[in-house]
Amino acid sequence: MNNRNSILKIVLPTLYIVGWLVMYSYPRRAFHVGGDNGFEGWILYFSMFLVLPFLLYQSLKINGINIKALKGLAYGSVFLAYPFSLLIDSEEQEDFEIYKKETIGTVSEAWMRKQNKGDSIWSVQVNYEVEGETYRTSTKDDVDRTLNIGDTVTVSYSSKTPEMSKVKELLDYYKE
């Protein structure tokens, strides 16, 4: 049993660190809606919010950390997802500007979406094609309700990660 604990004291923290490295190096397209990878993105988020904190918890536990500190650190590690998201977003925005291209897309869905405050906002999704493959934007808010199903729009996308996209006609609203 002691030999097993010695191995786990090394393996569990290593798995935790390797888990974050895998998340960071994973193809960015998995984090985006457009394309056929919706399930893959959920696995990544599940890993970030459940698997990695569990590995940290077990790593700290086997290394004899105080139980109160152990829980706090493990629960607190969930908040690592926020700076991780900021890092990924920052890198993606740089890539987007470097690899930005445009194509024509068609509004495939348009609907009133309830927001957290109870307000409703007109939202759209656009299908667009890149090198023979069809992609779909994430939900885009159209506060002025200018777009409807079937409308043609200009989509800016990253040639490196075509799932990253912006609808040019709506840029004033969600400009960063």
Image: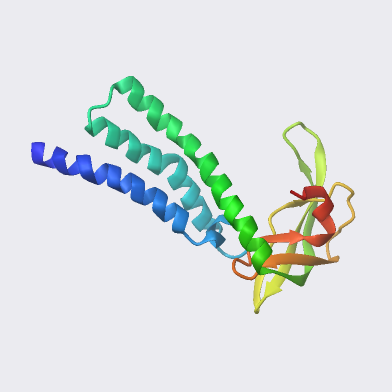
Q: Quadrant of the N terminus?
A: top left
Q: Is residue 173 above or below residue 30?
A: above
Which residue ends up furthest to the left in the rendered image?
A: 2
Residue at point 76%, 72% (across, down): 103
Q: Is residue 151 above or below residue 17?
A: below
Q: Is residue 42 above or below residue 75?
A: below
Of 151 and 72, nearer the camera is 72
Residue at point 80%, 55% (across, down): 171
Indicate the quadrant where residue 71 lies: top left
Of 149 and 66, nearer the camera is 66
Residue at point 81%, 35% (across, down): 119
Spot occupied by residue 125 in the image (x, y as percentages of width and height)? 74, 58
Which residue ends up furthest to the bottom in the rendered image?
A: 132
Horizontal arrangement in the rendering, residue 75 relative to residue 99 (left or right): left
Please state the total of marks drawn on the protein image. Answer: 0
Residue at point 76%, 31% (across, down): 117
Indicate the quadrant where residue 94 lies: bottom right
Horizontal arrangement in the rendering, residue 51 relative to residue 88 (left or right): left
Q: Is residue 8 above or below residue 22?
A: above
Horizontal arrangement in the rendering, residue 145 relative to residue 93 (left or right): right
Spot occupied by residue 19 in the image (x, y as percentages of width and height)? 37, 50
Spot occupied by residue 95 in the image (x, y as percentages of width and height)? 61, 62
User: Is residue 71 visible to us here?
Assistant: yes
Spot occupied by residue 37 in the image (x, y as percentages of width and height)? 54, 62
User: Is residue 1 visible to us here?
Assistant: no
The figure's colour scheme reads rainbow
